[in-house]
Image (cartoon, rainbow, N blue to C red):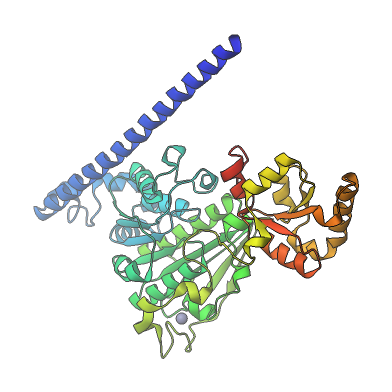
């Protein structure tokens, strides 16, 4: 009886918690809307005051265009001799577009909003997910499942309600890029994929906008300013895209949250320098950050290439930009959706539900998990044997002996009746592994379609995903 009481109490608390979270989210959304309305009223009042030469609007009274509120808010920046009133005033009159409200965009947006960029735009089509929060620090738990742009805009408004914040809740494509980017002075590339990098760089060349480009993966990051003052563009440096296997993303290879944090902060800093006309931008140079050894190196990079298809002497992209197929060019998708390969025929595959049936029936089999061993340590299916894809070819004898031992413990069986199944995270590497196994004589090998993600989705909802 007592344990039932405990269950009732915990479900009541869970319901109350959920309802409080819902209310909190609604209140936060309402706060954002009101802040934005207030800001619009304030800015229209300011422009009215300006036009009637009221002294509180700044202007000629102080010999610059900062209001008393602005002077107080930005005083620590105004006190910097190299930045001062002129730097702040330049910043307030500038506009910056941040493409991507993820790991890089989070700190960049927060600092840009805080420091007083006049107009701050943000582009992203994605929604906030729980596994974003360790690095995408602009988003909170109450925004899970909601638009990243909405969440980032609310956070920026709560820091600084006096600047203009523009939300672009869409993916940047060739069809909308020129229109969006043309509205800003400076662009920050805070995306995480090759086609977006080329698309953004080409668009900035076409429109003559300086580009602050950052990347972070694993424990390393890099940063450069492109298309600035006669300097190179991204395409000058990388005329051909890297092979697709080199284009990893956080979702596949992991990233320590602070690393994009560091690079995103540096991106904000470079953009602030460009906008305020203070300091020396990181053009024709690249900053390389190595978190493990705590090293930052600046390397000189080549200048503008005369052969560059975007910014060279005979640019071909000028006319073709909107027709250019960036996904085909880089052989990787613009969206963050994971790859879904189809290398095998249906006879060489089983679904996770079918595999579940096999286990329930007690069918003798061997299950090989071809993920890297550090993935296997996160979570794995019972009795799966971890042989990472990279070492599969050299560890075939282990598979033979496993099959043999399963056969021996089920004496009535022929060797061919012991099933051989392969699983990975999403069902791509498992297909590559089965191809190899077929080639090496393990002709009955099959893979589990959709890997452990489909297991978690279709069979066991409590099975952790990552
Ligand atoms: Zn170029």
Residues 354 and 215: in front is 354
Name the residue located 86 percent from the left edge and 48 percent from the top edge. 406
Q: Quadrant of residue 459?
A: top right
- Percent x, y for residue 388? 75, 58
Residue 442 vertical position relative to residue 106 in the rendered view, above or below: below
- Percent x, y for residue 215? 54, 62
Q: Quadrant of residue 202?
A: bottom left
- The quadrant of the picture occupied by the N terminus is top right
4 to the left or right of 140: right
Residue 217 vertical position relative to residue 75 in the rendered view, above or below: below
- Percent x, y for residue 357? 67, 43
Q: Residue furthest bottom?
A: 314
From where the camera sits, is residue 280 visible?
A: no
- Percent x, y for residue 295? 65, 60
Name the residue located 62 percent from the left edge and 46 percent from the top edge. 353
116 to the left or right of 250: left
Q: Residue furthest top?
A: 1
Residue 390 vertical position relative to residue 79 in the rendered view, above or below: below
Residues 419 and 437: in front is 419
259 to the left or right of 321: right
């Amino acid at each position: 009886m007592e344990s039932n009481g405990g269950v009732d109490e915990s479900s009541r608390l869970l319901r109350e918690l959920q309802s409080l979270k819902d209310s909190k989210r609604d209140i936060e959304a309402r706060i954002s809307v009101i802040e934005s309305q207030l800001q619009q009223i304030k800015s229209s009042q300011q422009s009215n005051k300006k036009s009637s030469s009221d002294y509180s609007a700044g202007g000629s009274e102080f010999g610059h265009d900062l209001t008393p509120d602005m002077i107080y808010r930005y005083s620590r920046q105004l006190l910097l001799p190299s930045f001062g009133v002129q730097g702040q005033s330049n910043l307030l009159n500038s506009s910056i577009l941040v493409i991507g409200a993820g790991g890089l965009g989070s700190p960049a947006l927060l600092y840009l909003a805080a420091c007083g960029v006049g107009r701050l735009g943000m582009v992203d089509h994605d929604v906030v997910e729980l596994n974003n929060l360790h690095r995408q620090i602009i988003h909170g738990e109450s925004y899970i499942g909601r638009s990243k742009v909405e969440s980032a805009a609310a956070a920026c408004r709560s820091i600084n309600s006096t600047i203009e914040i523009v939300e672009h809740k869409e993916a940047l494509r060739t069809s909308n890029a020129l229109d969006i980017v043309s509205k800003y002075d400076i662009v920050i590339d805070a995306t995480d994929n090759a086609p977006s990098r080329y698309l953004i760089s080409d668009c900035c060349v076409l429109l003559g906008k300086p580009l602050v480009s950052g990347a972070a993966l694993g424990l390393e990051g890099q940063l450069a300013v492109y298309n600035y003052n006669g300097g190179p563009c991204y395409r000058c440096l990388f005329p051909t895209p890297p092979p697709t296997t080199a284009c990893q993303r956080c979702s596949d290879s992991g990233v320590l949250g602070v690393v994009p944090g560091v690079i995103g902060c540096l991106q904000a800093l470079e953009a602030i320098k460009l906008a305020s006309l203070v300091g020396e931008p990181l053009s024709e140079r690249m900053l390389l950050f190595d978190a493990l050894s705590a090293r930052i190196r600046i390397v000189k990079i080549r200048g503008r290439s005369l052969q560059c298809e975007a910014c060279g002497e005979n640019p071909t992209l000028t006319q073709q930009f909107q027709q250019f197929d960036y996904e085909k060019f880089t052989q990787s998708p613009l969206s963050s959706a994971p790859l879904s390969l189809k290398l095998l025929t249906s006879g060489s595959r089983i679904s996770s539900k079918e595999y579940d049936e096999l286990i329930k029936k007690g069918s003798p089999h061997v299950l090989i998990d071809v993920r890297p061993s550090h993935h296997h340590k996160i979570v794995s299916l019972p009795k799966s044997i971890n042989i990472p894809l990279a070492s599969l070819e050299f560890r075939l004898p282990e598979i033979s002996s496993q099959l043999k031992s399963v056969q021996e413990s089920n004496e009535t069986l022929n060797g061919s009746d012991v099933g051989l199944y392969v699983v990975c995270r999403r069902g791509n590497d498992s297909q590559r592994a089965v191809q190899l196994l077929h080639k090496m004589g393990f002709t009955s090998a099959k893979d589990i379609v959709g890997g452990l993600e489909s297991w978690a989705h279709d069979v066991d909802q409590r099975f952790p995903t990552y």
